[in-house]
Image (spheres, coloured by chain):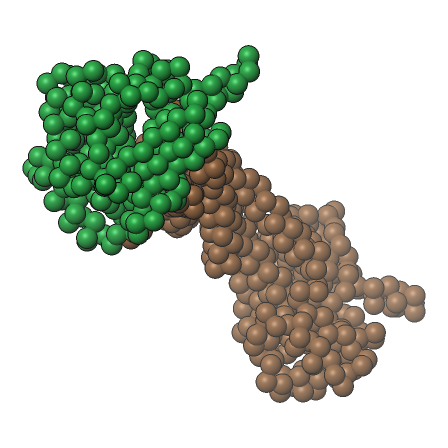
């Protein structure tokens, strides 16, 4: 039995609305294992991003708890392991516009406390792995959407997290580039032994995960 | 270099941009505020110093007077001059008199001085004529008094002293003392220039029937700035005499100069404060614009204090660079001050105000390190606060909210 790298139990979340609390997630439970790849599909506004934010510690559930495998192999709350236990890939890449590709990736390592030289070396190696060895000193404004997403994937992986949370990583890309990015994401995540949770609209991309879920009406069910 | 400092520098000066508008405008704003503050302070210091020097030169570093005229002033001067703190001591006598030139007359404050004293400060203020021609038959007048009497160099005037009235009471014919005007002085002090009349002390004693006595002594001190303490020490053993340091002679005037400087500092500081507020508001919009980046930094594991540091440092960097620019602008503008003033005078046709009103040959300056330290400290503090407020706001937000609201 592989190690559990992420455990979510009974997650409930509602947002305040003028007409009263608007439930988004109801009693969502999920267990992710090392090397797992999980896809979560759902229509717009179904709460996919909210679930991902709860799993990654960017937001707190109203009830329930999330535990994540920290680098020291203990299960901890995700917000205490941000940047180390969890790596994020966002739809809009979310790169720092003033930093080069290399600096963007190294930044994540620097924030995690890695010394500058080691962070830069690791960032260079990862960017080369994702096919951007010749674009290290380019600013995001000089990169294509696909290239930006490659930088974002390298950034998510630089601290060797146990889980990668990818929120519509192909949402801003054309079909061909999207497929390339999915190949890269699944390949590089598997190569590094991390688990992947992929939130997507695309049935095709969702099918490529080993386990598939659908989020509808705030309830998570196997597809 | 910590990552947040690196990122702060990159956000202020983005690579590939020739003109980082936000940083340039903010630094310029702070620089201009600091420069206004320091230029005003430095010029005010200059005026203050110039006035202080004139007070000392017009009235001496310390004046020694008594309830009655000093009986043996030369001996006392010799005794005081022997003190290691005293550079020189010379007796003087002074009194009001009626000055007359035909149909024109005025009240003169006649002062008997030693014309052979090379350190005699009046030498510096000679506007026309020659100080060295002063002798028993000649007189030096303040410019205002000369104007009132309608006299020029070489004209003759009469001086009627109170001692002459005594002669008249005793039944003797009072005869005025006649002098030829040999020089005119301009000190910048209206009360001096409108009444001063300088004659040799020997002649003054004759006209006032003073005998060997004098009304007081003027002391030049080796350390004029310490005149108050020195006067206290010199007074020991002379209970019958009053030792007045120069700071005490024009106490109210000096207090007014200090007050004026403080008020101007306060007014100019408001300019710096306005610049800081504008930085605060610009930083606030920048932070809001970067909300998503704040959320991303949090998702990468950035601690709250690091996010505060990232934006707080931007305020501080703007403050520090603006202060440096302010120093450079201050030095540059003050170095070209006479040219700038000349241009203003030509544009508005006001004539040379410095020469005509303040009677200084050029705008006086006095750089005071304390002003620079205070201006820097205030500016850095206000710009740091201007940066910290939006930084604290940004760091206090939930990452998910920051990313959603951007």
Q: What residue appears at the point 19 percent right and 53 percent down from the top-left corner? A: A117
Across and down, in percent, residue A195 comes to: 23, 36
Q: What residue appears at the point 32 percent right and 46 percent down from the top-left corner? A: A70
Q: Is residue A43 above or below residue B330?
A: above
Q: Is B304 on the left-hand or right-hand side of B147?
A: left
Q: Colour of chain A?
A: green
Q: Nearer the viewer, residue A200 or B127?
A: A200
Q: Is A102 on the left-hand or right-hand side of B266?
A: left
Q: Nearer the viewer, residue B401 or B114?
A: B401
Kindly indicate which chain is depicted in brown in the rendered structure. Answer: B
Residue B279 seen in the figure: no
Q: What residue appears at the point 28 percent right and 34 percent down from the top-left corner? A: A32
Q: Quarter-wise, where is residue A93 in the image?
A: top left
Q: Is residue B384 above or below residue A211?
A: below
Residue B71 seen in the figure: yes
Q: Nearer the viewer, residue B336 or A195?
A: A195
Q: Is residue B314 above or below residue A52?
A: below
Q: Is A183 on the left-hand or right-hand side of B189?
A: left
Q: Nearer the viewer, residue B387 or A29?
A: A29
Quadrant of the snapshot with the C terminus of chain B = top left
| Count of numbered circles in the view | 0
Across and down, in percent, residue A49 comes to: 34, 24
Q: What residue appears at the point 69 percent right and 60 percent down from the top-left corner? A: B250
Across and down, in percent, residue B174 comes to: 83, 64
Across and down, in percent, residue A105 comes to: 21, 40
Q: Is B136 on the left-hand or right-hand side of B43?
A: right
């Amino acid at each position: 039995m592989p190690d559990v790298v992420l455990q979510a139990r009974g997650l409930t979340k509602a947002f305040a609305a003028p007409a009263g609390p608007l439930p988004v997630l109801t009693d969502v439970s999920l267990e992710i294992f090392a090397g797992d790849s999980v896809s979560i599909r759902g229509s717009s506004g179904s709460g996919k991003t909210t679930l991902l934010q709860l799993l990654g510690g960017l937001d707190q559930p109203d009830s329930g708890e999330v535990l994540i495998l920290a680098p020291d192999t203990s299960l901890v709350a995700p917000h205490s392991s941000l940047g180390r236990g969890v790596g994020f890939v966002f739809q809009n890449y979310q790169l720092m516009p003033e930093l080069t590709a290399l600096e963007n990736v190294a930044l994540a390592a620097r924030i995690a406390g890695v010394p500058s030289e080691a962070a830069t070396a690791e960032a260079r190696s990862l960017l080369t792995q994702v096919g951007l060895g010749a674009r290290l000193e380019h600013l995001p404004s000089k990169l294509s959407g696909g290239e930006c997403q490659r930088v974002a994937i390298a950034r998510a992986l630089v601290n060797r997290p146990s889980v990668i949370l990818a929120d519509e990583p192909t949402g801003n890309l054309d079909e061909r580039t999207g497929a390339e990015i999915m190949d890269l994401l699944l390949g590089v995540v598997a190569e590094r032994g991390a688990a992947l949770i992929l939130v997507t609209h695309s049935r095709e991309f969702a099918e490529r995960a080993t386990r598939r879920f659908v989020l509808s009406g705030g309830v998570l069910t196997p597809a | 270099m910590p990552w947040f400092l690196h990122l702060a520098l990159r956000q202020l000066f983005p690579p590939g941009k020739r003109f980082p508008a936000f940083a340039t405008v903010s630094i310029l704003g702070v620089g201009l505020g600091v420069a206004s503050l320091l230029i005003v302070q430095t010029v005010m210091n200059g005026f203050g110093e110039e006035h202080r020097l004139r007070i000392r030169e017009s009235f001496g570093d310390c004046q020694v007077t008594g309830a009655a005229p000093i009986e043996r002033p030369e001996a006392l001067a010799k005794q005081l001059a022997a003190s290691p703190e005293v550079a020189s001591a010379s007796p003087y006598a002074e009194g009001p008199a009626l000055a007359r030139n035909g149909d024109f007359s005025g009240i003169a404050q006649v002062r008997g001085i030693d014309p052979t004293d090379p350190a005699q400060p009046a030498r510096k203020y000679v506007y026309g004529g020659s100080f060295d021609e002063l002798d028993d038959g000649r007189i030096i007048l303040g410019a205002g008094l000369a104007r009132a009497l309608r006299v020029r160099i070489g004209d003759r005037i009469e001086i009627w002293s109170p001692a002459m009235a005594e002669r008249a009471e005793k039944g003797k014919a009072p005869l005025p003392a006649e002098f030829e005007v040999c020089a005119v002085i301009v000190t910048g002090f209206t009360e001096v220039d409108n009444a001063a009349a300088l004659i040799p002390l020997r002649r003054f004693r004759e006209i006032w029937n003073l005998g060997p006595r004098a009304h007081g002594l003027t002391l030049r001190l080796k350390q004029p700035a310490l005149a108050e303490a020195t006067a206290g020490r010199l007074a020991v053993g002379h209970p019958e005499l009053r030792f007045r340091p120069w700071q005490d002679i024009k106490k109210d005037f000096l207090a007014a100069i200090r007050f004026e400087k403080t008020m101007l500092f306060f007014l100019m500081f408001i300019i710096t404060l306005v610049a800081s507020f504008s930085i605060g508001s610009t930083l606030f919009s920048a932070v809001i614009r970067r909300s998503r980046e704040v959320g991303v930094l949090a998702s990468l594991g950035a601690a709250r204090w690091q996010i505060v540091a990232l934006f707080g440092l931007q305020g501080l960097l703007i403050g520090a660079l603006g202060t440096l620019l302010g120093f450079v602008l201050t030095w540059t503008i003050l170095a070209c001050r006479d040219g700038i003033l000349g241009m203003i005078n030509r544009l508005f046709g006001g004539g040379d105000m410095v020469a005509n009103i303040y009677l200084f040959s050029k705008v006086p300056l006095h750089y005071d390190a304390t002003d620079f330290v205070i201006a820097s400290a205030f500016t850095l503090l206000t710009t740091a606060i201007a940066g910290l407020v939006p930084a604290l706001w940004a760091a206090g937000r939930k990452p998910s909210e920051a990313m959603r609201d951007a």
